[in-house]
Image (spheres, helix red, strand yellow):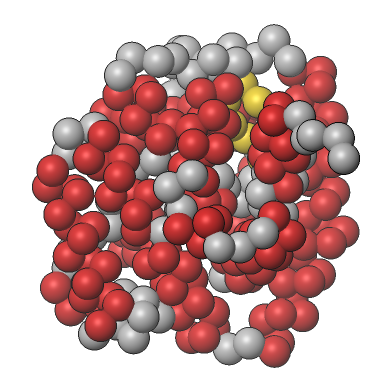
Amino acid sequence: MKKINPFCFFCLFVFLMNLSPHLAMATHNNQAVTSSKHESTDNEDWILGEDYLSEETEEGVEDLSDPLEPVNRIFYRFNDRLYFWFIKPVCKGYNKVVPEVARKGIRSFFSNVYTPVRAANCLLQGKLGGFWREIARFIINTTAGGLGFRDAAFEDYHVEKSAEDFGQTLGFYGIGFGPYLVIPFVGPSSLRDAAGSAADSFMYPPNYYMNMWESMGRSAYRKINDVSLRLGEYESFKETAIDPYVSIRQAYYQYRLKQLKK
């Protein structure tokens, strides 16, 4: 049997880790923004679950290098059509079958399982407060929160989740973004964040007892569940953007910069 080329496996993992385009625009209502940012998905689902599309881009701010723009635009159109032709119809059907309260519980459960990744990256960046908050959140949510189906740590004790990932850890140690990337099935990223997300996968416990197909199925279901709670946000963003591709790239860059500064 021929051995699998590690680089090919990495590319397959990166391309198929998620099944959704760029979604995550937060509402401009202050209370809703706070809730949305707290409940946003983790980097097991790449950057797509984050609220970067809610960023108001500033004129004159440096943008990400985009030497692969012609190819990136092709992938952007692919992800865009994938959303409208497949993801959105599936989510609409899913919404009719699964109540919203159950979908929010499922999102909270997946976020709780992702705790080791956030905690590890807090530790790698020397953020001991964030590390112990993640440990406390995991204990509270796993017990009082019913295995994490309810975010009891935040709802009962206002202990907020840390938004740390290995892409930020690399940035913390001075590694730049590298070129902008739009990855099929995944969405906007950069060379640094793509490598960071792959590294995060090695800190995610389920990946050690699930095979590749099971992991892909888990990620696909998680993404469908997350997107079902945010239907209409991407459409609203697209309607107000002159060039959605450029707007997403700029918002993504500025959002990641703000995360690094926290």
Closest to the observer, 114 or 57: 114
Q: Is residue 170 above or below residue 155?
A: above
Return the residue found at the far front.
Answer: 1
Give the image quarter of residue 222: bottom right
Closest to the observer, 181 or 16: 16
Taking the spot 19% from the left edge, 48% from the top edge, the residue there is 130
Question: Can you say which quadrant of the picture contains the C terminus?
Answer: top left
Q: How far across and down, in percent of the image, does residue 47 sit? A: 53, 43
Q: Is residue 194 above or below residue 152?
A: above
Question: Can you say which quadrant of the picture contains the N terminus?
Answer: top right
Q: How far across and down, in percent of the image, does residue 144 sit? A: 24, 85
Relative to 25, is 1 on the left or the right? right
Number of marks in the image?
A: 0
Taking the spot 39% from the left edge, 40% from the top edge, the residue there is 165
Give the image quarter of residue 233: bottom right
Q: Is residue 218 above or below residue 69?
A: below
Taking the spot 47% from the left edge, 68% from the top edge, the residue there is 110
Taking the spot 18% from the left edge, 79% from the top edge, the residue there is 156
Closest to the observer, 14 or 151: 14
Q: Is residue 233 visible?
A: yes
Q: How far across and down, in percent of the image, does residue 243 sit? A: 71, 30
